[in-house]
Image (spheres, rainbow, N blue to C red):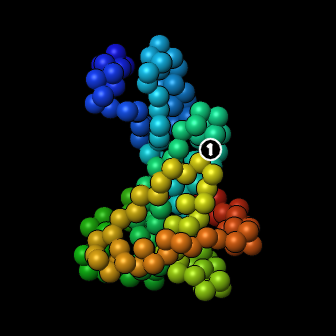
Amino acid sequence: METLSVLQKEGKIRSLGLSNETCWGSIQFINCLKSFPNLSIASIQNEYSLLCRLYDLDMAELSYHENISLLAYSPLAGGFLTGKYLDENIPENSRLSRVPGLFGRINENSTPAVKEYINLAKKYHLNPIHMSLAFCNQRPFMGSVIYGATTLTQLKNILQGIEVVLSDEIMIEINKLYKKYPITF
């Protein structure tokens, strides 16, 4: 922390960020920083998506009270929420072709959830990608949603939905699905 404090005073860093951290771990960092008033934690980079909402628990409360934003990675659950991996489909050169099971994301609990989220998007004439990213973006603790695109076509598709805002009605239905499928991996 002393080195980070010196680097901040030299103008080499502005703030700190944590990654893959728990609430308890974040509080330990916050407590350590009390001796260094020039340092603060600006963000926490953790996984967050329709399928992975662990941040909604104690981390959301920590974000609010400590003014620390989430930088959500894997908001499409490794591409699973796009629907491209349903029915055992493995597109050539896709992440699933290189990482079997997408680090445990694809399993008997997550597949039915993805199917229902995709059906919900279709019901409201939304692209599932746009719905998934808009959901993350609308969370009150969100600082930024980190998405990946392997091709220019994927990037263009993502950017077409950048202005999508989900209605309260859709958010209610998303939360009903989350209660049905709370922890999928």
Left or right of residue 146: residue 22: right
Quadrant of residue 131 in the image?
bottom right
Identity of the residue drawn at 32% across and 32% down: 13
Residue 22 in view of the camera: yes
The quarter of the image holding the N terminus is top left
Label 1: which secondary element: helix
Residue 108 in view of the camera: no
Identity of the residue drawn at 53% across and 44% down: 69
Q: Which residue is mark 1?
A: 60
Q: Position of residue 150 (x, y in %)?
A: 29, 71
Q: Position of residue 176 (x, y in %)?
A: 73, 67
Q: Position of residue 64 (x, y in %)?
A: 63, 40
Q: Foreground residue, 23 or 113?
A: 23
Residue kind at label 1, given as amino acid type: Ala
Q: Foreground residue, 21 or 166?
A: 166
Structural crowding at the residue carrying mark 1, measured as other residues with C-alpha within 10 Å and reported as few (<14), some (14–19) or many (≥20): many
Left or right of residue 109: residue 179: right
